[in-house]
Every structure is written in C-alpha cells, then in structure tokens.
Image (tube, helix red, strand yellow):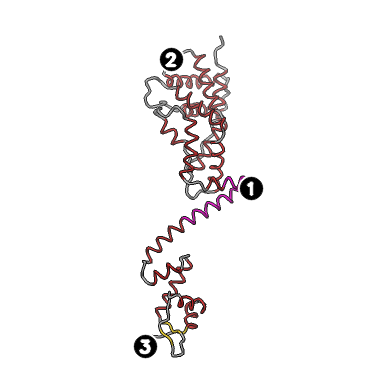
Amino acid sequence: MNGETLYSIGALARRTGLTVKAIRFYADTGIVPPTDRTPAGYRRYGADAIARLELVRTLRELGIDLATIRKVMDREVSLTDVAATHAEALDVQIRVLRQRRAVLTAVVRRGSTPQEMNLMHELARLSEVERQCLIDDFLGAVFDGLHDHPAFAAVTRSLTPELPDDPEPEQIEAWVELVELFQDHDFRTTLHGMAQDLAADRAPDDATGLPRILADAVRVQVAPALEAGVEPDSPAAEPIVTALAAHYARILGCPASHDPRTLYRRLAARLEQMNDPRRDRYLSLLAVVNGWPAPGSLAPVLTWSTAALRTRIPQR
C-alpha cells in the first residue's frame, strides 16, 4: 500500500510490548483495526497502528474505559475533555483514599475498638453540610439568646472547626473528639453560662462588644508573674491584681471607686468559670482541625489569678 511498511500482529506485539491477544482484542472491537490483510487473511498493521496502540495502552493505564477510548479514537470526543473528566474523577478518588488512610492511621494510633473505628469513619465521611449541622447545633446551644450581640458573628467564627477535604490523621482524631465534646451536655451548659455572663459584662455604652478580651488581658498581666515565680498571695502580686481589677472595671463600665470586694469576687467567679479543662481542650482540638498554631493553656494564669483575687477579697 503505497510502499508503507506493514507489520504482522506478532511484530506489532514486539514493537509495542502488548500481547498478541490484546492487539487482536483491540482490533476486534474496532479500536485499532488492521490496516490490511494478506491473501490468507492474516492481519497487517501500518505505522499509525503503533501510535494508536500506545495511546490505547496509556489511556487504559490511566483507568479510562474502552467505550470512552473508542470515542477518542473515532474523534467523537476530544482527548482533552476526556482527560479533564477523568482527572476530576481521580481527584475525588484520591480524596476518598486519603481520608480512608487517615482514618486507618488514626485507628492504629488510638488503638481503637471496632465501634470507635466505625464512628471515626462515619464522622470523617460526613458531607460539609452534615458537619456544619453538628457545629451549628452545638454553637447554637452555647450562644442561645446571644445572636443579637455585636460580637456574636466574630466569636462563632473563631470557634468553628473546618475539617479540610484531605485531612491528616491528627485532624481526623481531633474532629472525632470535638464531636464528642459537642455531645457533652454539661460542657454545652457550662459554655452557655460562660457566654451569657461574659456578654453581661459589658459597659452600657459599648456598642461593639467587649472592648478587650478578658482572657487575653489576664494572660498578658499574669504570664510574666508566673515565669518570675511570683506567688499569688505575695506583696509582689498586688499591682497585678490591681491592674486586673481596673481592666475588669473598665469592661463593666464601673467607676474607679467601685466596691473592691464585689469587683474581686465577681472577677474571681468569672475566671473560675473560664478555667474548665474542656474549654482548653476544645481550643486545642480546634487549632488542630483548622491548622492553626497550638494555643497556650490558660489554666495556669487563670488558677493564679483566681487565687490572687480570693486572698484579697476584703472581709466584712
């Protein structure tokens, strides 16, 4: 045929690395038909068959089905469109496989029981909408009655976990533990009371929420004292307690002459309420899920502050 070199099916198999059986199958299905036949009926293939077979092999190795490959060969669909479609499908499969690997790795690290593994798997594969329902239910209970507070939107955003599409094992573990905290009724009640009380601690003319975060103020004032080894009942703690009380008075909108006994007692009660290990744990897990820097525990500064305040509450 116009001097074109034709190959037997055996020669074609040697040049392409495919088996004779595979080439015959592709010929019978019309994907790579023979270029010609000998008078005895043997198939002969031209150089273009080598290129077609190499393309078929590549597409098969990429997981593309034969029906789609035939459409590509017949130019019914473009190779670009097929590649894009299958790349998207592979992205989904990869995410699923990564998620499964993360769950299995977490199971090994936690030494999980079959029941815990099932729970972890189910929680990990929840859709984004299903995860958001769990989160909204929890935060809705915590901030019930506070949706009109100026700081509501910002605070809820700062407490919302966002599990990525391709979570690491530690993020899966943290998410599972967060869901366990979501379902802890006592923890919900404690946080709700804390949110109500902190919302109430707001100067009457403050339209934007708390002017300063109480916890941050306590950390800034007390952390250096802890590092220096200052005891809460020592004279060296006096100016720190005074500064904390003054800061809290500004939050409340109280005059400087406000009764220190009432102020110290109220501030101590707030800090004791905040000093819940589950709160610290929630913030730590939240940081893992969201990929944020690990927060430092507030427990030491809250414990120190409460002790320092309690020892200075004036007696009647």
Q: Is residue 100 magenta?
A: yes
SS category of the residue bearing label 1: helix
Give the vertical position of 21 relative to 92 (above or below): below
Give the vertical position of 37 relative to 208 (above or below): below
Q: Which residue is mark 2?
A: 256
Identify residue type, mark 1.
Pro
Residue 219 x/y as whole percent = 50, 29
Q: Which circle's residue, 2 or 1, is located before the other in the chain?
A: 1
Q: CA distance from mark 1 to mark 3?
A: 69 Å
Q: Nearer the viewer, residue 259 or 127?
A: 127
Q: CA distance from mark 2 to mark 1?
A: 60 Å
Identify residue type, mark 2.
Ala
Q: Which circle's residue, 2 or 3, is located before the other in the chain?
A: 3
Identify residue type, mark 3.
Gly
Q: Which residue is mark 1?
A: 114
Q: Which residue is mark 3?
A: 3
Q: Nearer the viewer, residue 25 or 188?
A: 25
